[in-house]
Amino acid sequence: MNKKAFLVLAIWLCLFIAAPVFAREDIKKYPSCPYCGMDREKFSHSRVYLDYDDGSSEGMCSLHCAAIDLAIHIDKTPRTIGVGDYATKRLIDAEKAFWVLGGSKMGVMTKRAKWAFEKREEAEKFIKEHGGVMATFEDAIRGSYEDMYTDTKMIRERRKMRRMEHKK
């Protein structure tokens, strides 16, 4: 094998092996959601990472909790918004993702699921298996705000029920 081919192979192997490690840096930095406390590793398929233009960042478990952060920090502008790809669990650009709203699969922190996919084919496959509709990031974040009241009420009721079960 010539030196050039070996170098290309070595670089490719390094990227292939290292990519998953670097892709999870946001989980190491923010292991749990600041709003609900959920484990971001466990919910890596729905996690969100916000990188603001003032140099600050935050990691949440879901688009629901990211919408809370965006509303609280209204004077900050997101530089990038990363979201977990449902199929691969890698962090992808939320604005370029193919989103699926709804379907039979329960969402994270929401009744109406909002899943992101890097590849259109994966989103279409999900829709065939679980239902839902194709959407943009704008549709998904708007849906998060529209669903906020009912989702927050649902979460409150679930937590109340769990507390009552633990008292028994």
Image: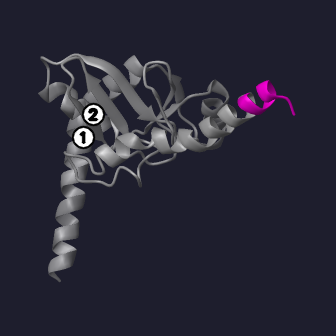
Mark 2 against mark 1, which lies toward the viewer? 2
Which percent across, then down, holds residue 154? Answer: 25, 50
Q: Amino acid at mark 2?
A: Ala
Residue at the spot x=16%, y=73% of the render? 164
Res 130 quadrant in image: top right
Using the image as rendered, state which of residue 65 and residue 114 is in the foreground.
65
Which percent across, then down, holds residue 13? Answer: 68, 39
Q: Secondary structure at mark 2?
A: helix
Looking at the rendered structure, the number of numbered marks drawn on it comes to: 2
Whether residue 111 is visible here, answered yes or no, is no
Residue that mark 2 sits on = 66
Disc marking residue 43: none
Residue that mark 1 sits on = 150
Res 147 quadrant in image: top left
CB of mark 2 within 8 Å of CB of mark 1? Answer: no
Which percent across, then down, holds residue 33? Answer: 26, 47
Mark-to-mark CA distance, 2 and 1: 16 Å
